[in-house]
Image (spheres, helix red, strand yellow):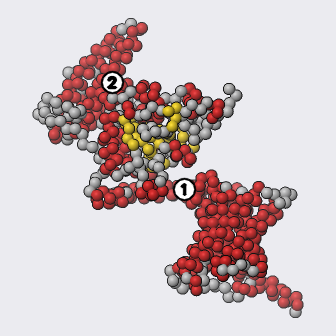
Amino acid sequence: MKDESLFDKVVANANPVDFAVGLYDGAIARPANAVRQIVAESSIASTSKAKPDESFAHKAGALTGQIVDFSLIAMASRAVLKPMLGAAVDSISGVSGSMFVAGAFDGGLLTSSDPSRGLLAGRGENALVNGATFAFMGGAGKALEAVSLVKAAPLLDQSLKSATTGAGGGVVFAYAHAGLHGHRLAKADEVLSSACQYAAFSLGLSALHAGAVKTMEIPQVRSAYLRGQWKMQDAAVESKRLTYATLNHFNMRHPIQRLTDAVLGEGRGNPMPRTRPALTAENNPVRAFHQDYAQYIKDIDAAELKYDTAPRQERRDHYDKINEIKGDFAAKLLGHWYGTAERPGLASFSDVELASTEYPVEKVAQVRQALTASMKRPAYNTASPFEAAMERLSPGELEGSNDTYEIGSGLGSGKEKFFDFSEKALSEKLGLNSEHHFLDRNHSTPLSWMPFEPSQKLANLFHCTVSRSLDSVLTERALLSSREMRLRGISQETGESAGNEFPSRAISMTRNFPVAFCYHRHSPAALTDFPLVFGISRDVVSRSQLAGFLEPGELLVDKLKIGTSWLDRLTGRKPDVTHIYAPDSEVDNINHMLSRRRISGVNVVGFNEIDEPQWNQTPARMVVPTDW
């Protein structure tokens, strides 16, 4: 009878059915009942036919279910806090904070409270007690990682540390629970019982983690996990793309901005209306375009003939003269497009307004299309859209050579002349000296090092693009990576990766203004584009990284916000993009676009108005110790 009684007890306490029921109760019924308590619904009853108090298997199953739940909550808590804490999420305080959030969530939402105490008070006490308990366990566990209790037995060592931190958490729980619920000190038996329970919980949590790690080391499991992870990532990317495509199709992107526009009676960030001098037959920009174009073909043909017939030692001068003619013509074309205070431009008038007997609407449309066409050639020996359009507009009696319609070599000087800035002067003013250049490109230089201090008109970091990208940047209120732009359905027409199948996943920044400025040349240049440089706050360095040895001196960041929101003003956060540098003549226009978008916190500065840098005089050897 004695042996049979012992056997019956073993069977009753090791019943796998009771364990399964306990697992269900701990992992599903417990949190479901807690949520139902909040919404005042009936609770989910346990399906166990045995008395839970008499079944060890049921208790073990319930504890396992709670461990599984909490491990998932802890991972989610860490994932949420990591973007805010960065590397600090793995420090003692970071782990403690992450576990506090997980414990507070579990206690406040997924654990039922005493109905007699009121829902809000009971859940608040649960959240505080559980948060403090798991914060202690997390911090203590992280602190004990560097300590070895049993060096010869790693498994035993980890078990002892887990049990120790769990027991300590149980003591915290006992005193916190007794203090908040009973306004007293915990009794010795309560402390002992709680310490044992949390020691078991901590051991189970550690065993689950160790088992998961060991399981993931199995090649087949690891391979299946990676395949599943890749598929999930692909599905997430495709889901994001389809979501944006749907929003774009129904014109539902940025609905709050559109609603605000409707309430305030303000439209999109359209450019400021250009000066519109009285249009006459004599100053019609289409007429002026054809006159200047005919003269350009004559001048360029004569210059090329001189180049071909000149002695070898004199050809360089004639080559420079050809580029000078192209630059002057580019400046004239920009004048025909933008106009001046005295002379109208195509941008200020419609095709119908510019049409005349001599130049019908179709001819005007051809000129407009040519001036805004891309100047980037699909191949070296293939004409660009701009060149093809200009060739179609050439006077019938004049026949230019193959390079007549290509003005790319003079485009830079033409824009400098029309927009009144000098890239050489900017480079001399803002370029780094040899010592700063060394530090800027040295991989050992701290990311926080800057060659000069920022000022009202000078930022520390720079990113360059062209004017056609400004509208989408202001619409998104951010600079986005090429990959993110394509996911959102934004046409990428600028940047090094514009024509690449695999776009960039980050935005590049540099401390060296001239290096950033030259990047506008990588864009599919259009005649009517002008360079724009975004000045970026040094505060973004904390979330940036080095671009690597292929792009020394450049920093990478995933996103840059423009302007300050109400939340930024409330928290005192500065915008990522603090300045926009543009030709002086375009400053008022860009300020107008920012105002229409209700974007504040960005200082628009003309290229000729940039402050003189106050250079950092700290010797390089004090920043990066070297042998020299």
User: Does the residue at mark 2 contact the one at mark 1 (Cβ under 8 Å)?
Assistant: no
Q: Is residue 552 left or right of residue 562?
A: right
Does 386 appear above or below 473? above
Residue 253 relative to residue 555: left or right: left
Residue drawn at point x = 65 percent, y = 69 percent: 132
The mark nearer the N terminus, 2 or 1, is 1
Describe residue 389's horizontal placement relative to residue 514 as left or right.
Answer: left
Residue 482 position, x and y percent, is: 46, 45
List the single residue furthest toward the right: 2
Q: Which residue is mark 2?
A: 327
Query: x, y percentage for residue 582?
Result: 37, 36
* Quarter of the figure with the N terminus: bottom right
Instruction: Identify the image quadrant of the C terminus.
Output: top right
Does the rendering let one see residue 469? no
Q: Nearer the viewer, residue 308 or 597?
A: 597
Label 2 element class = helix
Residue 129 percent coordinates (x, y): 64, 73
Which residue appears at 63% of the width and 56% of the height? 89
Residue drawn at 29 percent across, 60 percent down: 263
Q: Is residue 350 visible?
A: yes
Q: Which residue was labeled with disc 1?
A: 233
Horizontal and vertical percent position of residue 119: 55, 80
Q: Which quadrant of the figure has residue 150? A: bottom right
Q: Hey, which quadrant is residue 411 in on the image?
A: top left
Q: Regarding mark 1 in the picture, which secondary structure is present there?
A: helix
Q: Nearer the viewer, residue 390 or 569?
A: 569
Q: 257 and 285: which one is in front?
A: 257
| Relative vertical location of residue 603 with respect to residue 381 in this rendering, above or below | below
Which amino acid, mark 1?
Answer: Gln
* Number of residues whose C-alpha sits closer than 10 Å to that of mark 2, classed few (under 14), some (14–19) or many (20 or more): many
The residues tagged by marks 2 and 1 sit, at their Cα atoms, a distance apart of 49 Å
